[in-house]
């Protein structure tokens, strides 16, 4: 462990499980104090994981964290996150917008409520939290905003369609259109924030896994076979770390995939405690 985040405070949304919990643990292992945000304080839902569990693991390893229960689809809840983080830790240096909402159904079956939830969670929440955090990053003279995106933001190829094409099959069988639309908007939002803040020492990037991450949520969706790239969650956590400590002049405005970024930077994937290198193949 290098301690490269010592003295920093990070907010990580969707930190009860999966990618968010992994990023929070990796940041804490490098010395960050972490505000953990999610709807689930205690376990008991359909998926494993809770803020209490993430908090317990971080504290057991000697790290510092604070759990904030908030529904990211609720503007009033969103407005509480930055003030509560400041009250607990006194500063904000890093914001990771990881929480997301998805329903993998045919687009013609998406109800107005589905569309509104997707937009609130996947676009409006990152936008508003970034607005809330920005003044404190400016005051500190530096900051990092990382938006967690998805490969579903990529456009599918046009007709004629090859049913054997992995991406065509995923979009057809996984019905990823609504989720992909919001993640595409998030990518463009990230690039826009970066260029508009290019005169300031604040880095904004969007990061997506190469394929699906082998988290409880992804595995619960199912339908994975040998063609699918189930990326270890450690790769996303390592890539997030790299995007949340390097100067904005070095890396900002990127919409990148985890393994490609790590390969370009020459950085190995480590476990969530930062101690052991984990072999990963692209």
Image: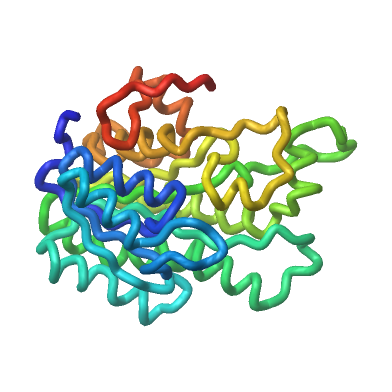
Residue at the image point whose x is 59% and y is 48% from the top: 218
Which residue appears farthest toward the bottom when viewing the image? 76
Quadrant for residue 40, please give it: bottom left
Say if 159 sits above or below 129 in the image: above
Residue at the image point whose x is 23% and y is 38% from the top: 245
Viewer-side residue, 36 vs 220: 220
Q: Is residue 195 visible?
A: no
Residue at the image point whose x is 40% and y is 61% from the top: 50
**Percent position of residue 170, x then y:** 74, 43
Viewer-side residue, 53 vs 20: 53
Say if 188 sits above or below 35 in the image: above
Residue at the image point whose x is 25% and y is 27% from the top: 275
Quick one: quadrant of the N terminus? top left
Viewer-side residue, 129 vs 105: 105
**Percent position of residue 262, x then y:** 40, 25
Q: Relative to 276, is 62 on the left or the right?
A: left
**Percent position of residue 267, x then y:** 33, 21
How did the renderer colour the structure? rainbow
Q: Is residue 236 visible?
A: yes
Q: Relative to 239, is 140 on the left or the right?
A: left
């Amino acid at each position: 462990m290098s301690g490269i985040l010592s003295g920093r405070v990070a907010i990580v949304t969707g930190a009860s499980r999966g990618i968010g919990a992994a990023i929070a643990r990796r940041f804490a292992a490098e010395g960050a104090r972490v505000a953990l945000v999610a709807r689930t304080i205690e376990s008991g839902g359909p998926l494993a994981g809770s803020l209490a569990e993430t908090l317990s693991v971080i504290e057991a390893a000697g790290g510092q964290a604070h759990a904030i229960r908030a529904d990211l689809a609720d503007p009033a809840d969103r407005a509480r996150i930055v003030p509560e983080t400041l009250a607990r830790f006194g500063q904000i240096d890093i914001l990771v917008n990881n929480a997301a909402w998805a329903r993998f159904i045919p687009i013609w079956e998406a109800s107005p409520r589905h569309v509104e939830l997707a937009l609130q969670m996947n676009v409006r929440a990152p936008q508003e939290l970034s607005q809330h955090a920005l003044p404190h990053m400016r005051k500190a003279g530096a900051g990092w905003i990382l938006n967690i995106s998805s490969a579903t933001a990529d456009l599918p190829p046009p007709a004629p369609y090859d049913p054997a094409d992995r991406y065509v099959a995923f979009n057809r069988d996984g019905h990823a259109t609504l989720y992909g639309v919001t993640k595409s908007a998030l990518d463009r939002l990230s690039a826009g924030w970066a260029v508009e803040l290019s005169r300031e020492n604040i880095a904004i990037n969007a990061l997506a896994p190469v394929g699906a991450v082998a988290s409880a949520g992804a595995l619960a969706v199912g339908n994975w076979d040998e063609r699918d790239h189930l990326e270890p969650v450690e790769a996303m956590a390592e890539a997030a770390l790299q995007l949340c400590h390097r100067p904005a002049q070095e890396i900002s405005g990127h919409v990148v995939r985890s393994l490609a970024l790590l390969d370009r930077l020459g950085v190995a994937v480590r476990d969530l405690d930062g101690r052991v290198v984990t072999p990963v193949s692209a």
